[in-house]
Amino acid sequence: MSKAAYINLSPSGTPFSRFVNLLWALVVRDLTGKYRRSALGLWWAFIQPLVLMLVFSMLRGFVNIPSDGLPYILFTYAALVPWTFFANSLSSCGPSIIDNAEVIKKIALPREVFPLAGIASALFDLGMSSMVLAGMMVWYKVAVGWSLVWLPVLVALAAAVAFSIGMLLAGLGTFRKDFIFAVPFLVQTWLFVTPVIYPISSVPDRWYSLYLLNPMVGVIEGFRTVLLKATAPPMEPLLASVAVTTVLLAVSWPAFRRLSAYFADVL
Amino acid sequence: MGHDTVIRVEGLWKRYGLPVPAVVRSAAAFLRGNRESRDGDGQWALQDLNLEVRRGETVGIIGRNGAGKSTLLKVLAGVSAPTRGRVEVLGRVFPMIELNAGLHKELTGRENIRLLGAIMGFSRREIESKIPEIQDFCELGDWFDEPVRTYSSGMLARLGFGVAVNVESDIILIDETFAVGDLKFQNKSLARVKEMRESGATVLLVSHSLDTLQFVAARGILLERGRAVAGGSSRETINAYETLVFRSEQERLQHKVRNRISSQEVKIHHARIYGDGGETLTEITAGDSFGVEVDLSIGRELERPLFSLGIVNAAGILCMWNISEEDGFSRPETGSRCKVRAWYESNHLATGAYEVHFAVRDASSFETLERIAGAASFAVIGAPRSRGVLAEPCRWDVVTIGPEA
């Protein structure tokens, strides 16, 4: 069996600028499409983390959850903002290939652009909810410092985790829908194994090393430390997160690339 | 690649679905309780296809439904991966396909054009410079800045097509898109394709409209069950395609007695088409003489037997209707087994598939003794493509009367 090959020698191609241009167009489409016909429009970006925060604050009234000596509302919200970004990213990555089936079936595109566009749209919502968070930090008079430069790194890391998992689910979900049905369930479960509503200090020691395998631990803990304690993120969870994410990407990206050649066949 | 070749396909095989290694497949089958595995075991959509297209050529891809035409375009567009073989494409490929489904309902026509442009790989500057032209082409007027969810289906199609035909590309793949819009819009679209071709673009075209293919494409490729079975000029290819279609129609009609009124006195055993040497034919070359022979038993004495013979084309139109007595044949028949023969010395039938209707009557009582629709079938094939019921060349002339008034 001879090796199959498709080679396009396009002299006028500038693949990177094309990719960015396409990504931008898809994000504009997603955001315009999402908010144009809703009465609350962009406010939805604030409402989601705000409601979650209120629910968890209520929860704290029933059970005693430690918050490392910080106001609990701030403690959870600082974690909910990056978590919501991650959850939204993952949720929009999952069905991104099936949702864009009509385009994928007809035009050759780098297919990564669709999960990436989902993440980029979630980034916009992240910007919105960050404003609420900033307001709260001013209200509680939280001192901030140079540690804020870590934020882009942490956001990128969260995006990378969402991209690696979301891409894999989107790719596999094209062949078997089960992988897409699993996304909301996965996001829900993941929330409870991530220190969002409880501090990492509550995790029992014997589970700790296993716990660090969750790449979102380093991201969420990092966010909270950088924002509320004005110091660099704890290195151990962060490095663990980077290592796990690298492995995830190394597995899921080539897998996605390989699967993507057959998307048009099965969509 | 030769310096002029823009598409080279070598030994292309294509089967749909993910190529799952045999081990994985049998494992999956085992897990599912040995139920039949459907993945990767599909039919070959393309088999051992070889193709070379030079810059500026216009190639029509012809074939029946499911022959692999769209699959070939998909592989050339890079949308679907080849299973085996090598595909080399030089230049920017542009699949001109209606992209209505890629449109977003909440965006306006203008916003959707920016989106489609980006999907098709154009820079924002390129798109912005094209927008006035596209806006003009689509003929949407004020609707252009309204959300497309308010559009009619025709408006949607025009929008998607408007983008497609107003962009520049080296290789253009067209799949059955000329059915969009009214006649005026279709002509405008064809004119655009012609312009693109004249500017040096290479065009590959799939269409079921043979007339479009004949006039737009110079070269043709005939696909049948995933294989390239004929090629050459578009006329030759269209001809080969029609032969294929007529043959299969003839096979469908063969021995398909649809309607029979029978008395026990006359019985038709068999009917066949024969040629000059008496040999049985299923295909007649256009213009050749042929005969119809009916083998029958006549069970009683017929003073004036009346045989009638009808030739009906695939569309059900009665093309010829001959009655023995009117053609000057009249002979009393006693009970016997005989072969009735009718010879058509000149044959003006257009290419196509035909079936034979035959009836036996008694002219003295005008009783129908046997009537059979679909007694035999045959195909008329041959070089000149005919569009009517009859094929007959005519002598053309233009007589100049004087200068234009």
Image (cartoon, coloured by chain):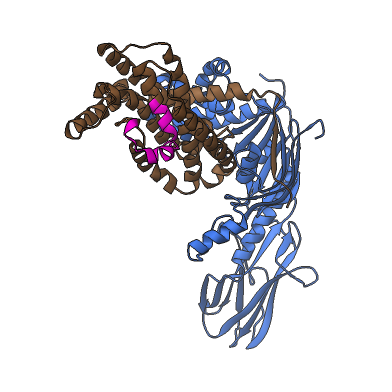
Chain colours: A brown, B blue
| Quarter holding residue A180 | top left
Name the foreground residue: B27 vs B55: B27
Q: Quadrant of residue B82?
A: top right
User: How many numbered badges does the structure rendering display?
Assistant: 0
Indicate the position of residue B153 as horizontal and vertical percent values.
43, 34
Look at 50% across and 20% down and name the residue there: B135
Q: Is residue A208 magenta?
A: yes
Measured as percent of width and height from the top left, residue A191 is found at 34, 36
Secondary structure mostly seen in the magenta stretch: helix
Residue sticking out furthest to the front = A205
Camera-side residue: B8 or B258?
B8
Q: Is residue A193 rendered magenta in the image?
A: no
Q: Position of residue B393 (x, y in %)?
A: 73, 47
**Quadrant hosting residue A37:** top left
Tell me if B163 is positioned left or right of A12 in this view.
left
Depicted B83 relative to depicted B402: above or below: below
The image quadrant where one finds the N terminus of chain B is: top right
- Residue situated furthest left in the rendering: A62
Question: Is residue A222 visible in this depiction of the protein?
Answer: yes
**Residue B275, relative to residue A226: is it above or below?**
below
Q: Residue at x 61, y 45 (%)?
A: B71
Q: Is residue A174 above or below residue A116?
A: below
Question: Could you tell me residue B402's position as x and y percent?
Answer: 72, 23
Placement of the C terminus of chain B among the 4 image quadrants: top right
Determine the residue located farthest toward the right in the rendered image: B2
Q: Is residue B167 among the parts visible in the rendering?
A: no
Rendered view: B320 above or below B202: below
Residue span colored magenta: A201-221
Residue at screen point 67% across, 43% down: B61
